[in-house]
Each structure stands twice: as C-alpha cells, then as structure tokens.
C-alpha cells in the first residue's frame, strides 16, 4: 500500500499544492447562512433611517431591540429545532400557557410566585417532551403533532382561565410574594447613557450566544445538524437521534416559558388569548435568517438577524407614519425572498462544482 | 494508511478468535421474511465475504450486525456473549464499525464534521464542552490523504464531493473508528477501478491488522481477491458457505450468476 501511496504522491505532486483552494474572505462570507439576512437588515435599516426620521435616535434603537427580543428569544430555539428538521407550531401559545399557569396557580393557592414559576417551567418542559416524544415514536410529521398541541393549548388557555378567574385574563399579581425578584430577572430595565434598556434584550443576546456555541462548537450541535440533514445517516453512525430531537423540542418550550415569564412580570397580568400567531413569526425569523425549512442548515445569529428585521420593520412602519396594517404584507414578501435565497444556497452547496 | 489501521486496531485481538457469531439468525419485517437460518462467524484476521444478488438479504444481514435493525430469530453473540443491539451506537461501542452503501454521509455538513460524526473529539467529558476543531480537521484531512483523496477544502460541504469520494470518506471514517470489526456494504459499487483497488487494499490491511472484516459485494472477483470465507445468500438463505480452500473463483462466479439456473437457461437459449 505504501508503494501505491508514494506513486500517487509523485503523480499528484505538481498539482497538490495548487489543488488546495484558499477561499477568500468574500467567498467564506457568502457561504454563511445568515449573509442574506444581514444584507437585507442593512438595506432595510438604511431605508428606514432615510424615510423615518424618529428612527435616528438611540432611544428608538433600544425600542427596536426590545421588540426584536420579544420574538427573538423563542426564535433562537425554534431556529435550532428547524435545523434539526422539525417544526413547533405550539411555541406561540405556550408562552401564554406558561404565564397563565404561573399566575393562576400561585394566586389560587396563595403561594410564593417562585413556586408557580418553577411548576410552570416543569409543565412547559413536559409539553415540549410530549411534542418530541410523540413525533419520534409515531413518526407523524411534527407539523401535525404540534398543530394538535397548538389547538389544545389555545383552547385550554381560554377554557381554564375562564373557569378559574371568571374572565379571560389573570388577576394582578404585583402584590404577591416573590414578585420583586422575579420582576428583576425577567422584566426590569436599566439605564445606558440616556436610554433605558430592557433586561430581556440582554437575555436575548445571551441565548443567541449560547445557541451559537452549542451549534458550532459542541458535539450536540454537530448532532443537531446531522439529524436535520440526514436522520438515517446520523442514526447509523451512532447519533442518539431521539434524544437530540426531544431535547430540541424541550429547548423551545424552555424559551417559550422564559418569554411567558417576561410577559407576565412586565404587565403583571396575562391575557388568555396571548401568543396566537407568534409561532409563525418565530419560523419566519428563523427562515429569513437563513435556516432551511427542510433542516440541516442555518444558525443562531441568522435567527437573531431575522428577529431584528422583524422588530425594526414593525416599529419603523409606525415611525415613518405609514399605516401599520402593511406590516404583515411586508413580512410575507421578506419570507418569500428569504426562501428563494435559501433555495439557491442549498443548490450551490449540494451540487458538485466542476473543476 | 496501514499504520492507521494497526494503530487503531484493538491490541488484544487474537488471530482466528470468533468476534461475532450468528446462530440461526432470521429477520421478519411483518409478514415478509428477509432472512432465515443464517449461521456466520466473523473471525479476527479474516475477511468474510457475503455475496448475493439484489434483494438476497445482504443488507439486512449487515444491518443486524451493525445494530440498525435488531434480529428477531436466533442469536447474535459478540465475543462469546449474547447481545441484542438497540442502536448502532451499541454496536460501535463493541468496536463494530460499518460503511453503509446508502447511508454514508450528511450532504450539507462539512467533510471533517462528517468524518467525526457520532464520535466527536471534545476537550472534556462535560456536556456541551468545546470540540477540538483544529485537531479534528487535521486528522480528517490526513486520513483522507492516506486514501489518496485530497479535498479542496476540509470545510466544504461533503455534498460537493463526488459519489466515490464520499464513499471513501465513509470508509476512512470506519477504518479510523472500527477497532475490532469492520463491515463494508458494497464498498466498491460506486467506485472506479483505481479507487476500488484502494478499498481492497484497505480491506486486506484491516485483515492483517487482526480485525474481523465482513465484506459485502456482488462482485465475486473482488471478493475472491481478499476473502477467507465465502457465504452466498439467495432469497434470504445461505446457499453456499465455504472456506477459501474449498472453493474456486469459477464456482463463486457461477453461483453468483445464478448457478444451476444459468445452466438451464443456457440449454434453453441454445442456438
């Protein structure tokens, strides 16, 4: 064998050095999933800086970041789940479920709010586990399974709240034990120069950083890309596919719980109908950020940029003095453009380049 | 390359010891019987060739040994102890690595990530600790070069490589991680003449390093070059089970081509 190898080396020797392509900065940048979203964010940003004068202040930036974080936190986990090849349509209403559970359980039993928050976390994780378990054990598409949980939670949110409180929102909780510390963690604001920034923005950055680390620099991240890219191959080389996917569904429910906590402690009360429709915003944020709908491709920074585009446009349409009803139409256009770009990217990276 | 195999081979392997034993193993998928009454022993330092036409049950057989589908009849012993693999991970933990014909790689992932998929190198045992990216890239590149494959960029998605190159990555990976038993499912089917030669040399090198090798193919010429033991499957059953000394290439070829059926056919088609 060593003989052949030497022969091969001799044969390839002249071309070997030049065979190794050093990819330039531009080429490497273009190969990243979030590049399309980044360019779009810059273009949209410049556009609104021109047409919406109120946007040109640090205060507006803080508001935009807050708006982005309200979608972005759950979108991080939804993006990871989509890289893993699955959907979660129940993520939007789960935010409300977590908040409602916490508020009503603690209020009715006259307990410390921390007890309610922790039980709410356990409950949310259990729903995430159930979503994942059903998808993996039945082999039914996650789109259908989570569509089911979406409707169950939506109905239960309204039904249970009506049953317990007699209305469609929870009682005010700001006089209860544990409120101050929980408010501090989930919904406080702090001063940066002349601007007030919500702590949820910081949490958003933290979660994006953690997700990026996990996806690109850990074993689990490698497995997430593999189960989304080719589940059968991943299983064949020893990746624990079931555990990875159930874990992903549970991360979504964890961050939905986190967002539920924020909503509750910011407004001190929560509406039972909250969160419906947000599941699509999370998916749009992830897809605009370069995540492939079919799995196996994308990253956390992309989902964050997607959320930022969402936050920026939803507010800047108002800053520009336009009718805010156009916002959804704009989101639809962004989604279509993103899907086209993604399709092109996938084609580029799966077809063999000649030469 | 030979060094890789010797380095990674389990040093406790003894020539001729039975690593994997199948006794009367069968597999049913619902009402369909894919395999029946298979007896097969994979010995250290030997190449066991499994031959057969499409649909003969070759793939089912290796999926049982590699833990992809558990068997439901008979017994499977590894190192003398009866096992029932729940997942491919369980088989890998016994040092059994497989190169699948159809399940080789994840197309959108980088070459080096594919190489180490499922056996990543991490800086510590703590969950979510960092990958040793540099080392992984270096090892993957080096192992591929030993097989005569120089990828343009170890960071490129593996989907950009040709079918043969992808197959070679899968083989290099199995050789690197398979310490005791190496299973090759039609490794030469997608390859050209030259790359087939490389794969056959790998097979021989693995055998010489003391590994037990299972070589699945429908090419009797390739099988006869490296095999010590030959099993021919037909419709899920073994129709030939002979040592190298008991069989000739002609007999293998004749059996593979249809054996008696072929003789009959040649009578019918006589001109």
Image (tube, coloured by chain):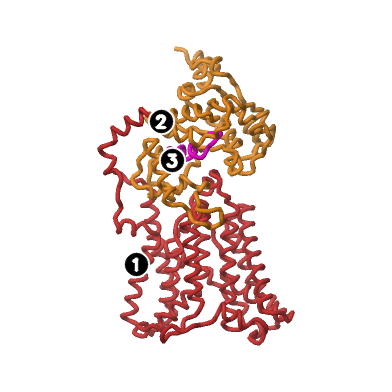
Chain colours: A red, B orange
Which stretch did the figure color magenta? B168-182
* Position in image of residue A192 (x %, y %): 43, 83
With respect to residue A333, does B121 lie above or below? above
Task: State yes or no: residue A192 in magenta.
Answer: no
Q: Disc 2: which chain? A: B
CA gap, disc 1 and disc 2: 46 Å
Q: Which residue is mark 3?
A: B169
**Residue at mark 1:** A39
- Tell me which numbered mark, 2 or 3, is placed earlier along the sequence: 3
Characterize the local packing of mark 2: few (<14), some (14-19) or many (20 or more) Cα atoms within 10 angstroms.
some
Residue occupying the point 58% across, 83% down: A267
Mark 1, secondary structure of its residue = helix
Look at the numbered disc 2 and give the secondary structure of its residue.
helix
Discs 1 and 3 lie in a common subunit: no
Predominant SS along the magenta part: helix
For label 3, the crowd category at 10 Å Cα-Cα, with few meaning under 14, some 14 to 19 and many 20 or more, is many
Q: Nearer the viewer, mark 1 or mark 3?
A: 3
The spot of residue A35 in percent (x, y) is 36, 63
Q: Are marks 2 and 3 on the same chain?
A: yes
The extreme right residue here reads A109
Foreground tag (1 vs 2): 2
Q: Chain of mark 3?
A: B
Q: Are marks 1 and 3 in contact (CB under 8 Å)?
A: no
**Is A246 above or below relative to B52?**
below
Horizontally, residue B76 falls left or right of residue B245, namely right
Q: Is label 3 in a helix, a strand or a loop?
A: helix
For the N terminus of chain B, give its image quadrant.
top left
Question: Which of these two is toward me, B168 or A316?
Answer: B168
Residue at the disc numbered 2: B198
Check residue B177 for magenta coloring. Answer: yes
């Amino acid at each position: 064998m060593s003989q052949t190898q030497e022969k091969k080396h001799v044969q390839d020797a002249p071309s070997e050095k030049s065979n190794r392509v050093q990819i330039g900065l531009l080429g490497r940048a273009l190969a990243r999933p979030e590049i399309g979203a980044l360019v779009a964010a810059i273009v949209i940003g410049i556009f609104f800086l021109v047409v919406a004068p109120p946007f040109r202040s640090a205060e507006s930036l803080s508001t935009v970041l807050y708006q982005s974080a309200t979608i972005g936190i759950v979108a991080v986990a939804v993006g990871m789940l989509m890289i893993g090849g699955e959907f979660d349509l129940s993520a939007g209403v789960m935010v409300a479920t977590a908040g409602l559970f916490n508020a009503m359980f603690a209020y009715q039993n006259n307990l410390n709010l921390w007890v309610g928050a922790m039980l709410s976390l356990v409950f949310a994780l259990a729903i995430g586990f159930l979503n994942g378990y059903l998808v993996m054990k039945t082999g039914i598409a996650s789109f259908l399974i989570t569509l089911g949980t979406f409707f169950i939670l939506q109905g239960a949110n309204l039904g249970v709240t009506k049953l317990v409180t007699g209305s469609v929102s929870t009682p005010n909780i700001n006089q209860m034990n544990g409120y101050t510390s929980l408010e501090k963690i989930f919904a406080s604001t702090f001063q940066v120069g002349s601007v007030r920034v919500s702590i949820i923005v910081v949490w958003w950055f933290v979660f994006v950083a953690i997700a990026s680390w996990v996806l690109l620099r850990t074993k689990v991240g490698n497995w997430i890309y593999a189960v989304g890219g080719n589940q059968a191959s991943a299983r064949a080389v020893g990746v624990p596919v079931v555990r990875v996917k159930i874990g992903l569904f549970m991360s979504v429910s964890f961050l939905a719980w986190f967002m539920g906590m924020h909503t509750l402690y910011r407004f001190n009360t929560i509406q039972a109908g909250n969160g419906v429709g947000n599941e699509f915003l999370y998916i749009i944020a992830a897809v605009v950020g370069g995540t492939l709908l079919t799995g196996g491709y994308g990253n956390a920074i992309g989902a964050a940029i997607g959320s930022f585009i969402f936050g920026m446009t939803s507010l800047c349409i108002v800053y520009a003095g336009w009718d805010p009803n156009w916002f959804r139409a704009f989101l639809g256009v962004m989604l279509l453009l993103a899907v086209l770009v993604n399709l092109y990217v996938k084609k580029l990276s799966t077809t063999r380049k000649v030469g | 390359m030979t060094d890789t195999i010797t380095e990674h081979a389990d040093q406790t392997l003894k020539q001729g010891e039975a690593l994997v034993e199948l006794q009367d193993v069968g597999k049913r998928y619902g009402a369909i019987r894919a395999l029946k009454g298979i007896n097969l022993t994979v010995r250290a330092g030997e190449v066991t060739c499994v031959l057969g036409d499409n649909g003969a049950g070759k793939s089912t057989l290796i999926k049982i040994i590699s833990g992809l589908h558990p068997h439901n009849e008979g017994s499977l012993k590894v190192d003398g102890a009866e096992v029932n693999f729940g997942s491919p991970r369980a088989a890998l933990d016994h040092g059994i690595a497989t190169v699948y014909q159809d399940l080789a790689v994840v197309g959108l992932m980088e070459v080096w990530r594919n190489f180490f998929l499922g056996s990543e190198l991490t800086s510590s045992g703590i969950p979510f600790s960092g990958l040793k990216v540099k080392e992984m890239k270096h090892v993957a590149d080096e192992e591929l070069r030993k097989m005569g494959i120089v990828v343009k960029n170890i960071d490129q998605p593996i989907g950009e490589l040709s079918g043969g190159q992808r197959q070679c990555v899968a083989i290099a990976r199995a050789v690197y991680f398979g310490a005791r038993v190496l299973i090759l499912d039609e490794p030469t089917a997608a390859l050209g003449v030259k790359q087939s030669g490389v794969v056959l040399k790998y097979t021989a090198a693995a055998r010489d390093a003391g590994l037990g090798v299972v070589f699945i193919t429908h090419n009797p010429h390739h099988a006869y070059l490296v095999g010590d033991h030959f099993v021919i499957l037909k419709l899920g059953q073994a129709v030939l089970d002979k040592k190298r000394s008991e069989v000739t290439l002609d007999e293998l070829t004749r059996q593979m081509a249809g054996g008696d059926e072929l003789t009959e056919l040649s009578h019918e088609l006589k001109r």
